[in-house]
Amino acid sequence: MTADINSDEMYPPIPVYGGRWTPPKRLLDCYNHMWIDTDVWELPENVTYELYSQPMRGPGAQGSYLVVLPPGYDDLDINGERYPVLYWLHGGFSCSRHALWSLQFYARKMELGTMPKVILVAPQALPKGRWINSYDGSRPLGDIMCHDLVTAIDERYRTIRHPSARWLEGHSAGG
């Protein structure tokens, strides 16, 4: 180990129960770059990868999500039909790609007519923690999802823009 590296930064102490551990800045920097899932080379044909702005994190900050549009969405829509949105939240230490099986399952149910037509969204988020704001405010995950992501989805797609038309589903920390 070199003299310029603090051993507490290399091997942070295990947080005590009931206490609040502040991770070293290098670890937080790594987490803060995990808002974008970059390993999306071979997605199913009906799944689209998109980036969106996260102004709550600061200028130029972005996140990513996967989206599946309901059958007939791209057809010429004379009536301007709008759709509810189902947000599928991945579990801790996971990524948006882990929602692919669920997105495909729901897409098939919509094709069969056994599920109402919805826009399916699987956002990428930090791998540690829950889908809520951190205690110290360094990771405003809840605010970003509720404001930045919902705003981006509402602006890009024909959504029903009311809280009653936004649903959550997921696994583990996202469920």
Image (cartoon, rainbow, N blue to C red):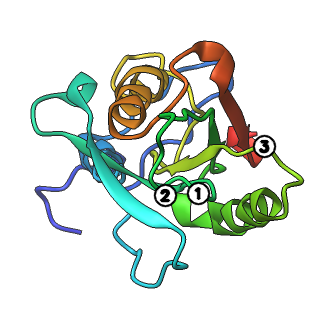
From the top left corner, tell me how far across and down residue 175 is, in percent. 76, 39
Q: Name the mark nearer the viewer: 3 or 1.
A: 1
Whether residue 51 sits left or right of residue 19 in the image: it is left
Helix, strand or loop status at disc 1: loop
Which of the numbered marks, if any, corresponds to residue 72?
1
From the top left corner, tell me how far across and down residue 43 is, in percent. 49, 78
* Location of mark 2 (residue): 75
From the top left corner, tell me how far across and down residue 99 is, in percent. 64, 60
- Whether 125 is drawn above or below 80: the answer is below
Residues under numbered marks 2 and 3 in contact, where contact means CB atoms less than 8 Å apart:
no
What is the quadrant of residue 94 in the picture? bottom right
Tell me the amino acid under the disc marked 1: Gly
Q: Residue at x 36, y 54 (%)?
A: 34
Tell me the amino acid under the disc marked 3: Pro
| Numbered-mark total | 3
- Whether 80 is drawn above or below 67: the answer is above
